[in-house]
Amino acid sequence: MIGDGLNDAGALKQSDIGISLTEDSNNFTPASDGILDARKLPLLLDFIQLCKANKRIILISFILSLLYNITGLYFAVQGLLSPLVAAILMPASSISIGLITFVLQMAGHNLLQSYLIR
């Protein structure tokens, strides 16, 4: 659903994805999932592709984290992982997933900048 967020706030809230178009950047429409500048309406398909790319980044990060934790659980249950090594690997997991997410996001940063400049 695409609307201005004023008289169609209920429909935006009920829709699967609600995007508000606004001429003023100070407008706040809590019923919508996203806010798009009205002048950028021709870029709506690009906006949707950008959202899908971000969803992919989140999914990749989640899968990597899940695989890391399953592997760690396997070694811990087998008794092959000492508490000291586990204590070192725990923050390393968070840092590595954060870095991977950051690198994937920065790879898409140029794409985002090209959309904003148009």
Image (spheres, rainbow, N blue to C red):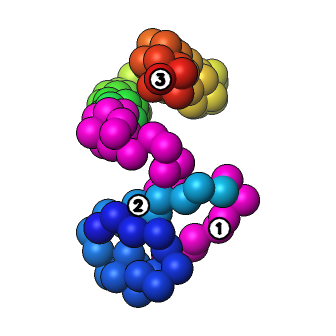
Looking at the rendered image, the disc whose residue lies closer to the viewer, 3 or 2, is 3
Residue bearing mark 2: 19
Amino acid at dot 2: Ile
Amino acid at dot 1: Phe
SS at circle 1: loop
Q: Which mark is residue 52?
A: none
Residue 59 visible in the shown view: no
Residue 15, percent from left and from top: 29, 74
Residue 20, percent from left and from top: 46, 63
The range drawn in magenta is 25-51
Q: Which residue is depicted at the point 60% across and 23% down? A: 95
For residue 12, above or below residue 106: below
Sequence-first tag of 3 and 2: 2
Are circles 2 and 1 on residues that touch, CB within 8 Å?
no
Q: Which residue is depicted at the point 65% across and 67% down? A: 28
Q: How many neighbours does mark 3 have within 10 angstroms: few (below 14), some (14-19), or many (20 or more)? A: few
Residue 44, percent from left and from top: 33, 43
Q: Check residue 47 for magenta coloring.
A: yes
Residue bearing mark 3: 118
Sequence-first tag of 1 and 3: 1
Q: Check residue 90 for magenta coloring.
A: no
Q: In which quadrant of the rendered image does the N terminus lie? A: bottom left
Amino acid at dot 3: Arg
Q: Which mark is residue 28?
A: 1
